[in-house]
Image: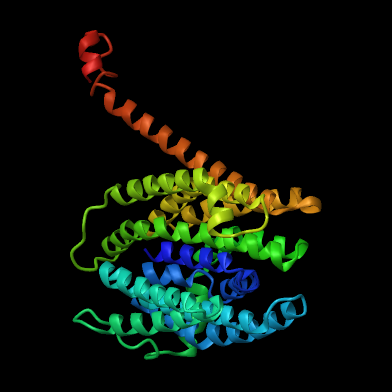
Amino acid sequence: MSGLLNAGMLAYSARQGQTGELAAYSVMTAALTWVAILIMGGSSLLYVSGNDDERRSVRSQRLLLAVPAMVVATLLIAGAYAGRGYGTAALISAGGVLILNSLAELRFSDLIRGMRFLAAAAALTTTRLLATLLLIAGVPLTFALAVGAASYLLTTEVLACRGRSGTRPMWRDLSLPAARRAFRLNRQLFTYSLADAFTGKASTIAISLVAGPHVVGCFGALISIYQALIAVVFSGLRVPMAIRTRRRHNLGPTEAVNRDGEVISIGGATLIAAVVIVSAPWLATSVLGLQIPASATWLQLLALALPFTTVNRAFALNRIGDGNYRAATRVVVSISVAVAGGLLVQAMGLGPAGAAATTLGAEAAVAGVLVSLAASRWYRSRKAKGRSPGAADQGHDRPRPSAAVGG
């Protein structure tokens, strides 16, 4: 629901002609994400899957080092883009959204780790609804999102501290030594987060370097809607990751890990992609009100990538839940390398259609490899189970054809 509200806000803003707000939001989040990743690395994932000492280090790093650096970076980025036709207030508000959400993310992770999915969903959805109502009331997009992010942080902080399993306030037990230790603890996930950020933001930054605010705003709206749709299916993938993490750390009663979450998420992504592909011309022109005819093709290319993206993220998050950070990192790095290669090949004539096609090609290629490897392992496993025990030692006593088929 939260992801759909996000997509709805972006669609409404585009329909109302707020391309300047959308452009400012796109470039600020794309640029500031790099700053956040360079400082925080993979600390968000470590906070979900790590032990208590690792989680304390992540909190210290986030509040004592990351937030001040992101504030300074927001002001510098706003100053750099203000001279290119972007609104300063919109840029600063967009930076505030990312900063507030980075803090709320920790408390949201506390709720997920504690299997309090209903509370987490309620906090996320109600605050998105507040931002949506402000937007409909006439508040600019970036300011509405900033108010929603502030209420999201407050709500998750209150919920995480309540109940028998509640945690202490976020600002307690902070220390600079612990903050510095976080850089060493999340070293394995740093590469994962850097590659993931590159995959999601590289196309927007590349387009902002070769096109004006109007084209960036239109493409940014579609990219943001695509990422909001990813968030819809991503929420289902958090459940098996949380179960795997609790089982690994012996955190109370654990549930058996099954494939329901992955199957539902991939099936939902495929259904969403099919609906968006069929209705893309209507969505781009009548709903979003985009004035660029080719925007429907951009949206179709991005929607086609959604099922492949879900397959890749399902594999990566499961490996993180199991503590196999290296396998998860290999997947995301492979995607980012494919994206970089695609953008570089088109460097002289890069456009939104080429950037969207690059995203599709990279996600589809890696998903194809993962599915092929999984099918190969399944086939070998079935073949091994089909062999009759002791057949190698009793080769002279071959089973009848019917028995072999039965085995």
Identity of the residue furthest to the front in this view: 286
Q: Front-most of 37 and 216?
A: 216
Residue drawn at x 52%, y 60% is 225
Residue drawn at x 24%, y 9% is 401
Residue 177: image x %, image y %?
48, 87
Residue 63: image x %, image y %?
48, 86
| The quarter of the displayed image where residue 175 is located | bottom left
Residue 207: image x %, image y %?
71, 60
> In which quadrant will I find the N terminus?
bottom left
Q: Front-most of 399 and 307?
A: 307
Asked if 113 appears above or below 163 in the picture, the reply is above
Examine the rendering and report whether any part of residue 54 can be seen. Answer: no
Q: Front-most of 190 and 161?
A: 161
| The quarter of the displayed image where residue 246 is located | bottom left
Asked if 315 appears above or below 31 in the picture, the reply is above
Residue drawn at x 52%, y 51% is 331
Q: In the visual, does 389 lie left or right of 293?
A: left
Asked if 304 appears above or below 319 in the picture, the reply is above
**Image colouring:** rainbow
Residue drawn at x 29%, y 19% is 392
Residue 400: image x %, image y %?
22, 8
> In which quadrant will I find the C terminus?
top left
Examine the rendering and report whether any part of residue 385 can be seen. Answer: yes
| The quarter of the displayed image where residue 117 is located | bottom left
Q: How many marks?
A: 0
